[in-house]
Each structure stands twice: as structure tokens, then as C-alpha cells.
Amino acid sequence: MLAVFFTGCMGSAPETKYVCSDGSIVSNKHNCEQVERYVCLNGKLVEDPADCPKPKSSTTLVTKYICPDGRVVEEYSDCGITSTTIKETKISSSTTTQPKSGIRLVGLSLADEWVQLFNGGNSKADLSGWFLRDEEDHTFIFPDGFMLYPNSSARVHTGDGLNTPSDLFWGRDDDVWNNDGDTASLWDSELNLIDKLSVGVREESTTTSTSTTTSLTTINVSTSTIISTSTSSTTSSSSTTTSISTTTSSTVPAGSVLLTEVMYDLPGIDDGREWVEVYAVDVSVDLGNWRLEEERLNGDKTQHLLKEYQGGLVLDPGVYAVIADDPSAFLSDYPTYGGILIDSSFDLLNSGLNLRLLDGRDGGEIDHIFYLSAEMGAAGNGFTLVRDGDSMVEGSDEGGSPGEPNT
């Protein structure tokens, strides 16, 4: 209802009029026709409550789980997944009895290229910075903020796709999991091994063959001894002849040369200033035609030849050498260095990398290290990563200690 004022001649009092809801004008608001109105839940004004819009019917959200065998269940435990699953002829087993935070690997499909995780704990798990690896050290890093909720699972697919709370995609063009058997390992952001799952992997068996005339044994190390014994006999006498010959194998045993120190992120501009230290453990080796292999976290690999620069390419037992991206830049940073200096070409990513040392005969892996700058340190602070057992840790010498024992 709206009140309006009408004014007549000058000096006369204004007359009040009211506009009713139906548009009529009256002198008294009580003269307006009284109509009852109702306010609906959505705010609409109606004369009859029946004219209010009907509320939408409520919906109930039901959570379902799809088991690896295709069954749809309401509880994931109904899938009946255990730590050991036998499918066709492949064996799947988990090696960790009490995974951290209840997270464990429950499935690995070699053919369809996915790994499945399950959270059997009572709280959600933040997998930021966690990573998966195969036996060849292909590495998938979980995205920041990825959560795995209790009694929920997620799959990591090798190929491309759109990430969801239950499916993550590696984005690789090539396969990762070997169809004849492989092992998936799950690591947390602090580099602790959480769980392992092997499919189609069996322990190697040792076979022994015997003969009535000849027995041959070969020891495959850097220096092998072959012993051949033959026996002949007659009715009247017998004689035994033993001949021993020694052969030298060109294969260098794995672990005979170690990657011991890495300067991957120098303060300021570090282009061409990166270097790697190697150490000959117990054999004399010629690094001619050896290579450094870089594998990025997305699986891309690049190999770099080693070339003579200072002091040759032969490492005697107990000798260190430095492999530099740019030897002249290295000597500018370390002018007193007088040891073996080897030229190569590489780009040690600051984020993380798999780094392998391969021999020159068949490309066999001699040593391998892996680093993540966010977890291991030495990121632009003037320090290096040094070897501590099978791991890399931040060293205590500013600038590192190329060509010397690490601290």
C-alpha cells in the first residue's frame, strides 16, 4: 500500500490518499480490500499456499566401489583383496607388513599399465611428493595436494588422461611395466619405502649340469678362472689330467666405480658449471666410451659420452675423478684441482634426476643414484650431494670436495 499526497490551492492542507495493491486509490487505507497472501519457501508471494512451487525430491548419495575383477560393491573390503593375489600365471605379493598410514599397493596390471593404491587407515593421507618407481627407476611423483581418503583407492595410469581423486595419469607415451614381470615400489616424500608389489617376478633358479667325462665351471668376475678336468680309464690303469687356464673378461662388475658426489645446483648462473665425482673401488678401469645417462622424472633418457681432458681416462683403485659439463668452467671454479678431469655434456636438473654410469662394452649399469632437490638439499646453497651408503645427502663442505673423500 502506497501513501500519496495531493495539494490544492496555496495555503490549503495536503490531502492524503492511499494506493491499494489492486491499484485503486482510497482516502483511508482501511478501505483497501483485505487480501491474505503467503510467502513461499523460495520467497514468492501467493494468495494460496498451494500455488507455492513444490520442493524438489531429495537425493541420497550412495558410494560404490569397483573391484579389480569388475564387481560393484558397497564396501571395498567386499572385494576380498589380500596381500597375495594369483591371477593367471602371475604372482602378486606385497613385501611390507605394516605400511605407513595404512597405504599399500593392492594391484599392478602389467598389460593395462596401472598401479592401484588403497588407504586402509582411519584418516585421509596427503600423498604430496610421494612417488612410484619400477625396477628400472622410472619415477612417477604424486601431485601436490593429492589426498587418498580412508577405505578409498586410486590408480596411477601410465598414459595420458585427466586426473581425478581416483585416477592419476603419468602422461608417458611408452610403457613402463614389463609384461614378463615387474615390481612397483611406493615411497613417501621423506624417501621412506612404504610398500612393494611384484607381479610375475620369481627368484632366479640355479641349474647344475654334470657329465661323466667333463665338468666345466666359470666364474664371471673381472678375472675368471676356467678349470677343465677330464678323466679316462682302461681295464689296466687310469690317468687323470687337469689343465688350468686363466682368461680376463672385459666386463667391469657393477659397483666397481661409484658416483660419489654431485654438484647439480650452484649459486647464481650454473650453466656449464655442474660436475659429478666418480671413485674406482677395487679395480683399474678405462672409462673410454663410458657414458653418463640422465633420466628425467618423466622418463626421458639422454646418454653422454666421456672424453679425456686432464689426466687420462684410466682410474686405478682408490682414485677419484671429476666429470664436468664444461671442464674450463670447472677449473675456473676450482683452480687448484689437479686430478683426473673428464669432459662430458649434461644438464643436471635442479628438480630431480636419475643418474647412471654405464660401461663402454655393453652399456651395463655400473652405478646409479637418484636425487630430489626438495628432499635432499644442496639446492643452490653452495653445497653438494655426497654419497652415504646407497643414498645421497647434503655434504658439509661448502663448494664440495671434488677429487677428495667426501664429508
Image (spheres, rainbow, N blue to C red):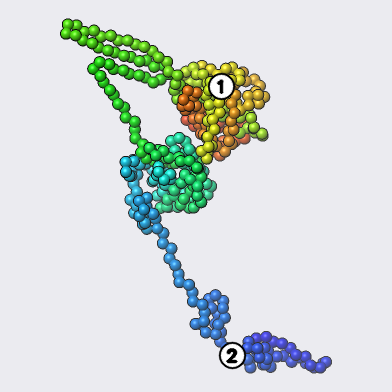
Q: Secondary structure at mark 2?
A: loop
Mark nearer the N terminus (1 vs 2): 2
Q: Quadrant of the C terminus?
A: top right
Point 48% across, 72% down: residue: 56
In the picture, residue 38 is in which quadrant? bottom right
Mark 1 neighbour density, 10 Å: few (under 14) some (14–19) many (20 or more):
many
Residue that badge 2 annotates: 34
In the picture, residue 110 is in which quadrant? top left
The spot of residue 244 in percent (x, y) is 34, 11
Q: At label 1, which amino acid type do we have?
A: Ala
Residue that badge 1 annotates: 321
Camera-side residue of 171 and 261: 171
Point 67% across, 88% down: residue: 19
How far separated are the C-alphas under marks 1 and 2?
102 Å
Q: Quadrant of the N terminus?
A: bottom right
Point 69% across, 93% down: residue: 27
The spot of residue 368 in percent (x, y) is 49, 30
